Image (tube, rainbow, N blue to C red):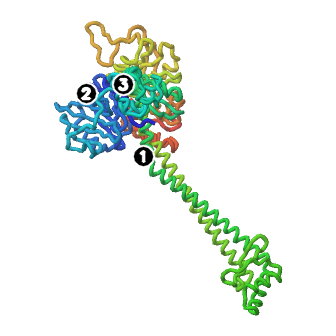
Amino acid sequence: MKKAMNALDIYACLTEVRKLLHGARVLNVYGIDHKLFMFKVRRPGDEPRLLVVEPASRLHMTRFSYKMPKIPPPLVMGFRKYLRGGRIVEVRQVGFDRIVEVVIERGGERYRVIAELLPRGVIALCDEGGLILHLSESREMRDRVLKRGVVYSYPPLNETKPWELSAQEVLERLKAGRDVVRGIVRGLKLPGEVAEEICYRVGLAKNTPPDILSLNDASRIVSSLLEIAREAERSHGYIVYEGERPITVTPFKPTMLSTTYRVEEYSSFNEALDEYFTTLSSKGLVERNLKHVERDIERIKAAISRQRELINKYVEKAVVYKAQADAIMGELGLLNEFIECVRREASRLGDWEQAAITCSSRLGLHFTGVESDKRLVRLVLGEHEVVIDTRLTAYENAAKYYEKYKKFKKKARRGEEALKELKDKLTELVKEAEVRRTSLAATVRRREWYERYHWLITSDGLLAVGGMDASQNERVVKKYLSDNDIFIHAEIRGGSAVVLKVGGRIPSERSLKEAAYLAACYSKAWKAGYSSVEVYWVWGSQVSKSPPPGHYLPKGAFIIKGEKNKLGLIPLRLALGIARVGDDVKVIVGPEDLVSSKTRWYVVIVPGDLSASEVAKKIKSLLYAMVPDELKPIVSSIEEGEILKRIPGPSKILHRREELH
């Protein structure tokens, strides 16, 4: 499984990401788990984006949301001090290596964020001259020292893009390996997956010795390299799966791997990187945080196994001692006669063993020997061998065996109690691990593009999105409303501009009314305390941003041409809950019929007197109480702010059954 981006991945990623970062403002810096750093950035007129950097592993934009720690690590605070509010002026790959440098200008000063994706790589914040201001980890290596207060120095770099070499240079460099595939890796500084793909494309066996390659072979390798580089510049991405397990991500079509594995194509390499590495990183986060719990689980399992073995031994011994005692009790008369006989004969002969042999023979008992203390005689009674102490009566001998039986039966019972305690502890640990696993998995959540807006998916599976303010209204209409989509708005000045994506199809009345709830509830009618508001819809082709001559349209306002289609009065009554959407759990809103068809865990709100922040806090608490234990960590991980932005204004919560229905 690929664990880190290589130089070609970085080259391809920056081809795309550079356009998204150049000129963007750094809004904030975050850090998670001391290994993951995020830069929240926004270009003028665009939505905020997250650049994720994991030293020694990856760098890309992400559409996943992360639960940030309440108290940022000191390193993050240091980055914020210098970078927040700054403007990104340059993003570059250093040489053709696994190092990315982002130059940020703030207050007339320039700062360099250097992200090393090399093994044991760091992330460093330097001033323009290279002095290290902050650093993820100090390093003292043979060729350089990295610590605060010293000038940053690069490791030995690969400066040349291999596809810019001549065929002759390539031919010479291939001799760095004992076969062609190793020659490409060592001589051209390319990763193994690229080397194998080149060999496959040019039809060269991987184990071909470089010495027998011709200049024509080298030319074919250069051509293949150029082809792969051009594919990387197209910024398409490919994730390769072994079954359901992702094993690598590439910016070129992995034709060799596609003969054996499933390959999923993405229109954006950045998206492919995000999907692949976020999944990998989330798994690593869970593994790191569960390591000691899982160690305890294995320790308890081993203790349970040992305890079971011990209990079995106790039970076996108790069974044997009980059988021996019963055997003696079954022959009390005969054994008492034997004991008296042995005592008499031993007194006459002066030899206990000979006395036992004589008496057992006389009474028809099966004698097998004596113990070291000659007064202890071994006899077989039925199926059981017993040791008879000739100094005691037969009953007293039986009583000794019964005592041993009781002793081991008691040990077995105590062992069962200890086993139950171990099992209970194991159950607790397994539950704790599952809760932690769920909670940690919920730390990283996939965010679809539409989650930046008000949104819902109708009963017919149609997506409706609406702006949260005038700027978003402008953006929603400009980016997502085509002529054959539907525009929905409340008949009141000030409200969410809602786009229902229908692609020219005539939607059902039900879908139209469900989408209309976004327009109604997220309008000024809610804050005004109305119980309902009129809503209309038109085709996208009827919406214009061009005012009549001499007039001005404020941000978020539109001209509607032609006739409006009335949807009637829409109640200001909004259901809000949590539901599974694909592989994730999301906060959903909409009319109660729609939300209740997707989840059992929701509340209904109407305009009221409680502030939106108070309502968000109460809703989170109510949802937490509603859901089963396995979902509580997910609800706990949901930020109140995520609920808050779904609340239209001052509200009243309806959550009693009689109020809901």
Is 333 positioned to the left or the right of 511 in the image?
right
Name the residue furthest top: 549
Marks 1 and 2, how far apart at CA: 35 Å
Q: Is residue 574 visible?
A: no
Q: In x, y percent, where is residue 345?
A: 77, 89
Q: In x, y percent, where is residue 325?
A: 73, 74
Question: Is the C-beta separation of discs 3 and 1 under 8 Å?
Answer: no
The mark nearer the N terminus, 3 or 1, is 1
Amino acid type of the residue tagged 1 in the rendering: Arg
Q: Which residue is mark 2?
A: 90
Marks 3 and 1, how far apart at CA: 48 Å
548 over 64 or under it: above or below = above
- Kindly identify the residue that appears in the image at 42 percent across and 19 percent down: 499
Q: Is residue 308 visible?
A: yes
Q: Secondary structure at mark 1?
A: helix
Marks 2 and 3: which is nearer the front? 2
Question: Is the C-beta separation of discs 2 and 3 under 8 Å?
Answer: no
Q: Which residue is mark 3?
A: 524
Q: Counting other residues with Cα less than 10 Å from the Cα at mark 3, is it few (<14), some (14-19), or many (20 or more)?
A: many
In the image, 14 versus 623, the foreground residue is: 14
Q: Which residue is mark 1?
A: 288
The mark nearer the N terminus, 2 or 3, is 2
In the image, 487 versus 194, the foreground residue is: 194
Q: Quadrant location of residue 188? A: top left
